[in-house]
Image (spheres, grey):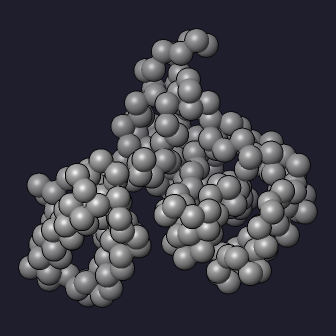
Amino acid sequence: MSDKGHLIALRTTVSEIREKLEQAGMDITAEQLIDEGSWGRVDLSVANTSRAGRVQVHCNTKGRISVVPQGPLTESIRSLLSGTPVTTPTRFTNAIASKSVATGTVKIPPGTVVVDCSKTGQHLIGPTEWRGMIALDDGAWSECFHSPLFPRGHNNVGEFLAILDALRLVHAGTISASKIYTDSRTALSWVRNRKIKSKFDAATEFDPAFCKVLGESVAWMESAAFRTLSQAVHHWPTSQWGDIPADFQRK
């Protein structure tokens, strides 16, 4: 599919989604094209009388469309979009639960948290977001936190911030996790060494909101709570276990 074909497919899907949601009485309060070319993504901000949510519509380099409802309206949006190809971050099939690897059968205990970051676009600095998924008792995965989309961020830094978000939520008692996994060796080394080794000038290259979160996270690394909780962070061996379940599926 050509670049133009990708964008047409993306726009067509967005139009169909808008029509279904508006017919159901939901308001589309904003529409944002994140990027275009050989891939693209449109974010739709959705609201009804009492709640708000978001729908991400993504077209990858092969022309595959993914529709990801997010927020309090997730279940309502998913129901309304029945028949639309939907990829949801809230209930992943635990494909690794029965995957045989060299060390034996992989079984992820309930309560395990995995994190990942997505930085879109071809430049090192670009739209960045991250999220965490938690393993449920039935072997599925549920999204337990999701950052805002920052206009100018960086993938390695986002991977690091995803780990710090998970640790702070554990510290606050919002989630309970005995282990936290990341597939980023770089971010994991920053956590273990309590030091970010990045050549970027955060103040000039990242957007202010991203810089604020980064500054708060770096400051928190000096706390006793961080030093204790960071021992729960481990590397996810993608080559053995497959993609980490928090992956945004945008390859």
Return the x and y of residue 154 as percentages of the image width and height.
Answer: 64, 63
164 with respect to 52 (left or right): right
Q: Nearer the viewer, residue 234 or 174?
A: 234
Query: Which residue is pictured at 53% across the width and 15% down the height?
Result: 101
Which residue is outermost to the left? 23
104 with respect to 178 (left or right): left
Compared to 82, does 192 lie above or below? Answer: above
Return the x and y of residue 180 as percentages of the image width and height.
Answer: 65, 44
Compared to 133, does 244 lie above or below? Answer: above
85 with respect to 117 (left or right): left
Compared to 213, does 241 lie above or below? Answer: above
Res 27 seen here:
yes
Res 54 seen here:
no
Return the x and y of residue 71 as percentages of the image width and height.
Answer: 39, 69
Query: Which residue is pictured at 62% across the width and 58% down the height?
Result: 155
Compared to 240, does 117 lie above or below? Answer: below
Query: Which residue is pictured at 34% across the width and 51% down the height?
Result: 61
Return the x and y of residue 64 as percentages of the image width and height.
Answer: 26, 50
112 with respect to 168 (left or right): left
Q: Nearer the viewer, residue 53 or 122?
A: 122
Query: Which residue is pictured at 31% across the width and 76% down the height?
Result: 44
Q: Nearer the viewer, residue 113 or 190?
A: 190
Q: Where is residue 188, by image quadrant?
A: top right
Tally of numbered discs: 0
Q: Where is residue 20, by image quadrant?
A: bottom left
